[in-house]
């Protein structure tokens, strides 16, 4: 009964993630190279922000595709799904931290060092998560592998929830300080805060659904919940992609405004001083 809705949700998630991946590549090439008359180079294209957002959408698409594949390749797809989840987690956390670390430093200075260290060491627990997922997928009847799988996911999930909670609080506090206390803040920080709130709330929803998928007995219901996770994951990277696009637009608008002001001042100066 839930097979068709699951397929539809996975198809939507795959389509959205692939569209975002190709669109952000097009957008970066056009708006960061062609329109600013900057020579294209692979080194410039492979900047941290570009790689994370493109890889994040790619891994999100990979996860939703593995959810659509049926029984003959089920174990292989389960291993790949575990890898794509870990990769998407890394891209999400690394990108969110790269964009929002300055906000955390301003709002929760006491937590900054610990979070910075967590981001640096993050590949280690994520690789461990991949290995645990692969072992559990290949040997689902093993009690030891099952305990390791759920133990690692529980610990890592709790750490990510704590990380996201501080990020969410920082974003909310930044907006509150700006609007209620009239503190000065750049438009980039405001956009990062708004889109950061959206992405972290979606992550909380994704974790809640993941817990539900692990609790339910029915395999059909569990598969449906994983298709919901695929949609939520694609929406997380939709928020991060929109953050990237809005920041680029804002940067170009600020540059154009500065040039316009500079030209206006030069014209006024010449007019005042006379010929």
Image (cartoon, rainbow, N blue to C red):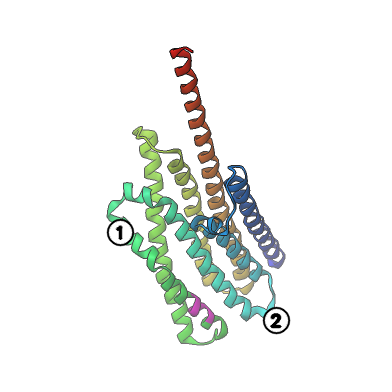
Disc 1: CA contacts within 10 A as few (<14), some (14-19) or many (>=20): few
Q: Between residue 47 and residue 207, name the one nearer to us.
A: 47
| Residue 117 versus residue 19 in the image, above or below | below
Q: Magenta: predominant secondary structure element?
A: helix
Q: Earlier in the sequence, mark 1 or mark 2?
A: 2
| Residue 212 versus residue 173 in the image, above or below | below
- Is the N terminus in the top left, top right, bottom left or bottom right quadrant? bottom right
Can residue 60 be found in the magenta stretch? no
Question: Picture coordinates of residue 134 (x, y %)?
Answer: 53, 80
What SS does tag 2 mark?
Answer: helix
Residue range (magenta): 130-134
| Residue 230 versus residue 99 in the image, above or below | below
Query: Would residue 77 be found to the left or right of residue 134 on screen?
Result: right
The residue that appears at 29% across and 52% down in the rendered structure is 109
Q: Which residue is tagged 1?
A: 113
The residue that appears at 62% across and 80% down in the rendered structure is 76
Q: Which residue is tagged 2?
A: 72
């Amino acid at each position: 009964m839930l097979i068709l809705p699951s397929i539809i949700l996975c198809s939507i998630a795959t389509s959205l993630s692939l569209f975002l991946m190709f669109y952000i590549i097009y957008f970066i090439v056009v708006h960061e190279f062609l329109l600013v008359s900057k020579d294209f180079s692979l080194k410039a294209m492979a900047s941290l922000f570009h790689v994370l957002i493109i890889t994040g959408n790619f891994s999100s698409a990979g996860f939703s595709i593995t959810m659509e594949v049926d029984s003959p390749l089920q174990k292989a797809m389960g291993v790949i799904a575990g890898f794509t989840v870990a990769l998407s987690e890394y891209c999400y956390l690394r990108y969110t931290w790269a964009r929002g670390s300055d906000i955390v430093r301003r709002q929760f200075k006491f937590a900054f060092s610990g979070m910075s260290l967590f981001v640096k060491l993050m590949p280690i627990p994520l690789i461990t998560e991949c290995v645990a997922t692969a072992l559990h997928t290949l040997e689902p009847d093993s009690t030891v592998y099952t305990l390791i799988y759920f133990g690692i996911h529980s610990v890592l999930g709790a750490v990510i929830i704590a990380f996201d909670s501080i990020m969410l609080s920082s974003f909310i506090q930044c907006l509150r300080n700006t609007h209620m206390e009239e503190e000065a803040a750049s438009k980039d920080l405001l956009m990062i805060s708004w889109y950061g709130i959206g992405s972290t709330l979606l992550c909380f929803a994704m974790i809640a659904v993941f817990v539900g998928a692990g609790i339910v007995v029915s395999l059909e219901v569990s598969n449906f919940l994983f298709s919901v996770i695929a949609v939520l994951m694609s929406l997380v990277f939709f928020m991060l992609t929109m953050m990237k696009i809005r920041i680029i637009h804002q940067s170009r608008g600020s540059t154009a405004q500065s040039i316009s002001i500079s030209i206006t001042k030069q014209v006024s100066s010449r007019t005042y001083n006379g010929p």
